[in-house]
Image: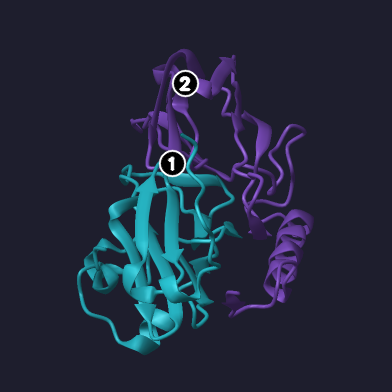
Chain colours: A purple, B cyan
Amino acid sequence: MIGYLSSPSGSVFDDVRRMQQELDELFGQFNGLDAIRSLPRSGFPPINVGVTPEQVQVYLFAAGIDPAKLDVSIQQNVLTIAGTRTAQAQEGRKHFRQERFGGEFRRVLTLPEDVDPDRVDAKYRNGVLQVTVARRAAARARKVDIQ
Amino acid sequence: MNTERKDVSRQAADRSVSGAQQSNGEREREVFLRPATDIFEDDEQITLVADMPGVSRERLDVQVDQDTLTLEGRIDIEDVAELQALHADVRARSYRRSFVLSQELDAERIEATLKDGVLNVRIPKRAELRPRRIEVQAR
């Protein structure tokens, strides 16, 4: 019915991307060493984590999820995000592609140790869950005056 | 659908470039994410469902050029000052994917909706080419 520009699923591009991810894992994209609880670069949903001196920002790229069904919890500096995405498969129609994730997911990530688990804020917008965790002031780098 | 194509800038972080018109050559160098897509068909239409988390309606572009359907969208996340990446599964700022449509599809009547980062595109079949079926009414 619909012809595809790229080859059918399991395309060369997917393979290349997977290979690149594995290479990134092998050689470490951000630093040479992996922490014991570090996050592998795979799985649903994709996650980006960024830090500023004041806070840690976690972005979860999870489209089409009812925010009420998302379970976000933090214990000390370990953040867990779990949820379910309902698959759309229905009877009486032909499926040509089913690439989208369906089912339960859970991702656990270790944040910097100075985060304050009492000051967490989460919002879901356009299919992205943004979790903001504040960092403790005492841990921020302070400029030392030289006498 | 909204057309924000001119806004797609090569460097996601470089705000100064956005809004400026760019040549095709520059655009081609941008790395695009390939949205995961489900496609299914019933008697009336083909439905395409694509995950494009982070894309707002203003940043979404669904286009049909002759027989090619192109989905394009830009992740619209507010920038945080001084943000340093610790981990990044998503390493591009824009999605793009194209499909070739077949003759019996009615490109004029494509409908698209976007909710929570999920794009839903319905492509109806031309009425004269649909399987004929006689509705039997109860009552």
In this picture, is B137 found above or below A97? above
In contact (CB < 8 Å): disc 2 and disc 1: no
Determine the secondary structure under disc 2. Answer: helix
Residue where numbered disc 1 is placed: A127
Label 1: state its secondary structure.
loop
Q: Which quadrant: the C terminus of chain A?
A: top left
Q: Position of residue A12 (x, y in %)?
A: 73, 75
- Place of residue B59 in the rendered image (x, y in percent of width and height, measured from the top left): 30, 58
The answer to whether residue B29 is seen in the rendering is: no
Q: Quadrant of the N terminus of chain A?
A: bottom right
Decide if residue A71 is on the left or right side of residue B27: right
- Where is residue A93, by image quadrant? bottom right
Image coordinates of residue B63 in percent, x first then y, are 35, 73
Residue at x 43%, y 60% (from the top left corner): B122
Circle 2 residue: A68
Residues packed near mark 1 inside 10 Å, few (<14), some (14 to 19) or many (20 plus): many
- Measured as percent of width and height from the top left, residue A145 is found at 33, 31
Of residues A96 and B77, the one nearer the viewer is A96
Q: Which is more N-terminal, label 1 or label 2?
A: 2
